[in-house]
Image (spheres, rainbow, N blue to C red):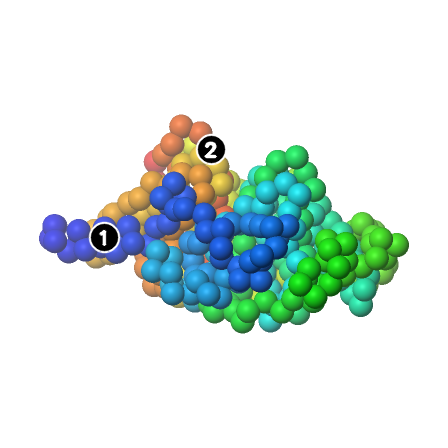
Amino acid sequence: MDTAVNSDLAQWMKKNVGRYAEKLPDWDAFPASRGFPELARSQVRYIGAGGAHEKTGDTQTLTPDHFTLSVMQQPVGKYGASHAHECKEAFLVLDGVLTIGWEWDGEVILARCGPKDMCLHDAYRPHGFRNEGVDPVMVSVMVGKARPLPPQYTYHPKTHSPELSWNFGAQPDKIKMLDCDSIDPRHRNMAQHIVRYSQQRVEWHPAGFAKQVYIGEGGAPPESFRKDLITAPRGVGVQPYARDTEEAYFVLEGVITAGWEENGRIVEQRLGPRDLILNPPGQVRYFKNDGATDAQFMMIVGTAKPEDVKFKATAK
């Protein structure tokens, strides 16, 4: 084996890993929040800058293609003012409970999302969020574009009253909680974009892992990427495979080993909670759980097309 070449592959793989413990939160990521302590929140960037358009030159983040990924922390009692994007934006709650509001002409529908619940905000739909709970909220945020435009604020304390901004643009009598059984098209539209971890169907793959679709067929409607929650029991792994688009593993629980293979050479990186690897297009890769407990991670693929990889279990 050519040690130098193998070292190059190992270094390239290492550069595609983002480790949570090595990142510092940026409390000045969002220019529109400056001067408004009620809007305080931090951002930890993994892939691209997302909605923090001033931070697109951050050299500590991985280069985005079809999606960005960051982690936001919002203290208790703070909120994010209502705004819209030109593409879809996914909020996956990691810790705490997040209240989300979608606005239609002065009327707002609210939904509360707990750990491993997700809301995929529709393109151009004004939305806001706040922490009404007792614990800080941690959210994985994904935007379906490499360099999205700056968010367009619809109700912000700079231009509207604090009460109206907190309520995302609605008077108290114009606010409703999401009703998934409603025939109102607004409720139906929002419900299609929310995934509840406890309610999402579990599909067991012959390769030994379980999959819950978050974005894609059976989950929220995709635009530029798909997202599946993978549960890999202890001892389970898959044989090397490749895709023609980028793919990320973002670990939620446990430890997984990600591997790259090239011309018979293999390099690996172990990933713990909130660590991420971005697998480039064409790179042969695999995952396995050789840890002490079961593991869960998000598998994010840079296409809206259905899954076409035929996963095979690692030989015992």
**What's the residue type where badge 1 is placed?**
Gln
Name which quarter of the figure residue 149 lies in.
bottom right
Mark 2, secondary structure of its residue: loop
Q: Position of residue 300 (x, y in %)?
A: 48, 55
> Which numbered disc flags the more N-terminal residue, 2 or 1?
1
Residue at the extreme front of the image, as rendered: 35
Q: Residue at x 38, y 65 (%)?
A: 57
- What type is the residue that disc 2 sits on? Asp
Which residue corresponds to mark 2? 294
Q: How many marks?
A: 2
Pointer 1: residues within 10 angstroms few (<14), some, or many (20+)?
Answer: few
Q: Nearer the viewer, residue 69 or 244?
A: 69
Q: Nearer the viewer, mark 2 or mark 1?
A: 1
Q: Residues within 10 Å of mark 2 (few under 14, many from 20)?
A: some
Name the residue located 29 percent from the left edge and 54 percent from the top edge: 15
Q: Quadrant of the C terminus?
A: top left
The disc at residue 105 is none
Q: Position of residue 175 (x, y in %)?
A: 83, 54
One can see residue 308 in this view = no
Residue that extends furthest to the right in the rendered view of this protein? 173
Disc 1 marks which residue? Answer: 11
Q: Position of residue 85 (x, y in %)?
A: 61, 67
Horizontal arrangement in the rendering, residue 103 relative to residue 70 (left or right): right
On screen, residue 207 above or below 172: above
Distance between the Cα atoms at labels 2 and 1? 28 Å
Say whether residue 20 is visible.
yes
Image position, residue 43 (x, y; %): 49, 52
Horizontally, is 41 left or right of 60 in the view? right
Asked whether, in this view, residue 45 is left or right of residue 239, the answer is right
Q: Residue at x 70, y 66 (%)?
A: 159
Q: Secondary structure at mark 1?
A: helix
Viewer-proximal residue among 255 and 169: 169
